[in-house]
Image (cartoon, rainbow, N blue to C red):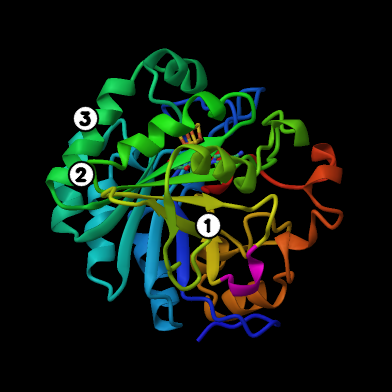
Amino acid sequence: MLRDRYHRLHNYLRISLTDKCNFKCSYCMPVSQHSCLQQRQLMSADEIEKIAAEFVSLGINKIRLTGGEPLVRNDFGDIAFRLAKLPVERVLTTNGSLLHRHIETLVNARFSSVNVSLDSLNPHAFASITQVNHFHRVWKNILLLLEHRIRVKINVVAINGFIQQEILRFIELTGNLPLHIRFIEFMPFKGNGWNSEKVITASELFRIVCNEYDVVKLKDEPHSTARKYKVIGYEGTFAFITTMSRQFCGECNRIRLTADGKIKNCLFGKEELDLLAALRTGMPLEPVIRQSLLLKHQTMGGQFTHGYRNTEAHKIFNRSMVNIGG
Ligand code: SAM
Ligand code: SF4
């Protein structure tokens, strides 16, 4: 069992497979082009399998693959099948653009759920956020996942002034499709131009939805970061991830591994321990993993101590999001 100093049990590992991405989302990719890791700095498929197996032996029962864009890795299939040998739930976060190439892998390696990022239902607005023209491809791939009976959650980063034009269209999507739309409050990371004016809180978004629809609260899953709702009579659900306005660190069960094999004990954590170096030098992994958890802060990596409205983004010490793997 993996516990931190605050007795929180950690059973969910998020592994970033790469810091490369075929999109350039404005809220994620740093304004100054970020430099990609060299091949030798990345964890290989074999190293990922070994590290994941160690975590599983310590009580991890769910693994999410993320990035950068995890599906740009040529050996994604190899990694997926190696992880399928472990007794864990497997899930993925992706921008959706390459899913059609990997759908068989996801089915055969028994991925239970896929989170697809989609911030706009307007192809032009989609292109202006991501810098690529792949809206229709991503949408087709979302339908492909549903055809294969894989649970789909759509991640929408809510940016003030922009999301207001989109939110009701997203809610309407849940009418006939079993989609789970999650609106994520915009978070600050290195180089993403964050300021508190760009944040629109979940309660403001909720008000917009309630002005148009009759909504019910649903039960949230244990450890979930999302507060879940449904429009009465609609097939899908929607939820808010309130990282900025209402933190949910009390139940945190997550631990992260960057693509270069550093353990990050919190999305906003400054302390990183080099697990890949330990593996490559033949050191035992368990003490490094336990040490990382002992360094975990009670909330928000020990940062954001004055609330998000008073946060000065340049004083937050962190990687850019594409280098962490959300
Ligand atoms: N490329 C994949 C994707 O876009 O889904 C996986 C990696 S991406 C870094 C993981 C998630 O982080 C995405 O859902 C993305 O929308 C979210 N994200 C990135 N930057 C964010 C930010 N500044 N605030 C909130 N969520 C963010
Ligand atoms: Fe790439 Fe995902 Fe970041 Fe967009 S959010 S730039 S798709 S890693």
Viewer-proximal residue among 225 and 271? 225
Mark toward the start of the polypeptide (3 vs 1): 3
Q: Is residue 186 above or below residue 3?
A: above
Q: Report if the CB atoms under discs 3 and 1 are less than 8 Å apart.
A: no
Q: Which class describes the residues within 10 Å of circle 3: few (<14), some (14-19), or many (20+)?
A: some
In magenta, the rendered stretch is 248-252
| Labelled disc at residue 153 | none
Instruction: Find residue 274 and report its image quarter.
Output: bottom right
Q: Amino acid at mark 3?
A: Lys
| Residue 8, position as x, y percentages in the image | 60, 80
Label 1 sits on a secondary structure element that is: loop
The percent position of residue 173, horizontal first and vertical second, equals: 31, 36
The structure residue drawn at horizontal position 71% and vertical position 60%, both measured from the top left corner, is 300
Q: In terms of secondary structure, where does tag 3 sit?
A: helix
Name above or below for residue 125 compared with residue 29.
above
Give the answer, above or below, for where 36 lies relative to 226. above
Q: Earlier in the sequence, mark 2 or mark 3?
A: 3
Inter-mark Cα distance, 2 to 3 = 9 Å
Q: Is residue 227 left or right of residue 310?
A: left
Look at label 1 and name its amino acid: Gly
In this figure, which residue is indicated by the disc labeled 2? 145
Single out the mark in the foreground, 2 or 1. Answer: 2
Identity of the amino acid at label 2? Leu
